[in-house]
């Protein structure tokens, strides 16, 4: 028996979600966000699947993430959306990695570093349009691109921004950000300097703002099967990609009145059978699920009981007499209509699906599967 929790990643579902987003975005192309280890799903296998499915570009946040993809054999174009140390620009140039530029100081430092390599840096100037997180001040964007365009070792390939309110039912903030980016693109076009790739839309903006798709879009969470806005769920068919499973390692008989786990937050009210699973909050199963979540054991739902520990979660299997040591328990199902869905777990934990996915720890072994009905290719 393997005493290990696994994340089962369905690459067929990932491919299908990509195709759904690509069809919705057309003629805009897809930049596939695979930052944070592909939202916890495994950067290299998921990137390969998305590249094979047709993604025009992959997007990460750090240069190290980009290098991991290159080292993993990905030839696909990669954009680093975060801030990169100017001392590492030579690595980006050598490996053919695009960098986002967050302000004039960074742009000029990157250009100077690129000149020393003798190569050409491909960059995307990030315009601040309302997120107030990173980016080039709105009034500085056109002068910065003019300056970079005059430098022989820099090629401005992109103009980008990031939406702060795309999920909000009130469209006004997103519309204003879209319009500000469009004004910049138009101003650059009049000067003959419009970059070939203008991009802004995340998953929610792609779905809700057809006129804000520009040349490329960056649907992140949707690729992994999560609809970013509840009201869109009935209208956009996405397939969850990840399921979490773990074996029962022990089963104990617990008498009436006996508590379990730290602080005895659950006390047996009847003679009970309590199973231990080798998964806890160190693996990404949130402690906030204590005495709230359910799991599936031998096809039946059973409650998780007692405090979720760092390495262990307990389950009351009294009503599942067929449960035994070695039974595989599902803690998260790749279904939208399940009490074990990532939506349900996120709601119970008071967070968002993104955090549940990204919190899945390194001890959790990722295994990659395909639907029999759709074949083995991405």
Image (cartoon, helix red, strand yellow):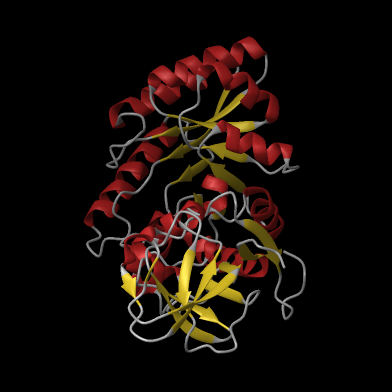
- Can residue 108 be seen at all in this image of the molecule? yes
Q: Say if 182 sits above or below 371 in the image.
A: above
Q: Residue 186 location, x and y as percent? A: 38, 40
Nearest the eye: 187 or 219: 219
| The N terminus sits in image quarter | bottom right
Q: Say if 33 sits above or below 27 in the image.
A: above
User: Horizontally, is 95 left or right of 125 in the view?
Assistant: right
The outermost residue toward the top is 116
Q: Residue 285 location, x and y as percent? A: 46, 60
Q: Say if 41 sits above or below 79 in the image.
A: below
Q: Residue 361 location, x and y as percent? A: 54, 51
User: Quarter-wise, where is residue 208 in the image?
Assistant: bottom left
User: Horizontally, is 150 left or right of 249 in the view?
Assistant: left
Nearest the eye: 341 or 175: 341
| The C terminus sits in image quarter | bottom right
Q: Residue 283 location, x and y as percent? A: 51, 54
Residue at point 40%, 39% (across, down):
185
Residue at point 42%, 85% (across, down):
271
User: Quarter-wise, where is residue 60 in the image?
Assistant: top right
User: Horizontally, is 313 left or right of 288 in the view?
Assistant: right
Q: Say if 173 sits above or below 67 in the image.
A: below
Residue at point 43%, 58% (across, down):
309
User: Horizontally, is 53 left or right of 30 in the view?
Assistant: right
User: Quarter-wise, where is residue 211 in the image?
Assistant: bottom left
Nearest the eye: 298 or 61: 298
Count of numbered marks: 0
- Can residue 334 be seen at all in this image of the molecule? no
């Amino acid at each position: 028996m393997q005493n290990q929790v696994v994340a089962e990643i369905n690459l067929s579902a990932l491919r299908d979600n990509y195709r759904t987003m690509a069809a919705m975005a057309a003629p805009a192309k897809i930049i596939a966000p695979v930052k944070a280890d592909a939202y916890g799903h495994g950067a290299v296998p998921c990137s390969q699947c998305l590249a094979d499915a047709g993604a025009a570009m992959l997007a990460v946040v750090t240069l190290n993430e980009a290098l991991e993809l290159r080292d993993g054999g990905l030839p696909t174009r990669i954009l680093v959306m975060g801030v990169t140390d100017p001392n590492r620009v030579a690595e980006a140039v050598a490996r053919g990695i695009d960098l986002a530029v967050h302000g004039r100081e960074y742009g000029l430092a990157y250009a100077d570093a690129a000149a020393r390599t003798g190569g050409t840096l491909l960059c995307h100037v990030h315009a601040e349009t309302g997120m107030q997180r990173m980016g080039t001040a709105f009034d500085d964007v056109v002068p910065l691109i003019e300056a970079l365009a005059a430098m022989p070792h820099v090629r401005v390939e992109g103009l980008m921004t990031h939406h702060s309110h795309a999920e909000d039912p009130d469209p006004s903030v997103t519309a204003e950000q879209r319009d500000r980016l469009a004004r910049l693109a138009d101003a650059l076009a009049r000067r003959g300097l419009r970059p070939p790739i203008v991009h802004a839309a995340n998953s929610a903006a792609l779905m809700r703002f057809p006129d804000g798709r520009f040349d490329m879009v960056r649907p992140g969470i949707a690729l992994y099967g999560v609809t970013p806005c509840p009201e869109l769920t009935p209208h956009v068919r996405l397939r969850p990609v990840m399921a979490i499973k773990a074996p029962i390692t022990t089963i104990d008989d617990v008498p009436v009145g006996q508590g379990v786990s730290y602080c005895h937050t659950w006390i047996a009210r009847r003679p009970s059978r309590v199973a231990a699973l080798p998964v806890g909050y160190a693996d990404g199963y949130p402690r906030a699920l204590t005495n709230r979540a359910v799991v599936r054991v031998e096809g039946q739902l059973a409650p998780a009981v007692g405090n979720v520990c760092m390495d262990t979660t307990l389950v009351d299997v009294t009503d599942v007499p067929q449960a035994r040591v070695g039974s595989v328990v599902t803690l998260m199902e790749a279904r939208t209509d399940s009490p074990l869905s990532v939506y349900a777990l996120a709601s119970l934990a008071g967070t968002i699906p993104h955090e549940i996915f990204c919190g899945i720890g390194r001890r959790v072994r990722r295994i990659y599967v395909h639907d029999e009905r759709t074949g083995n290719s991405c």
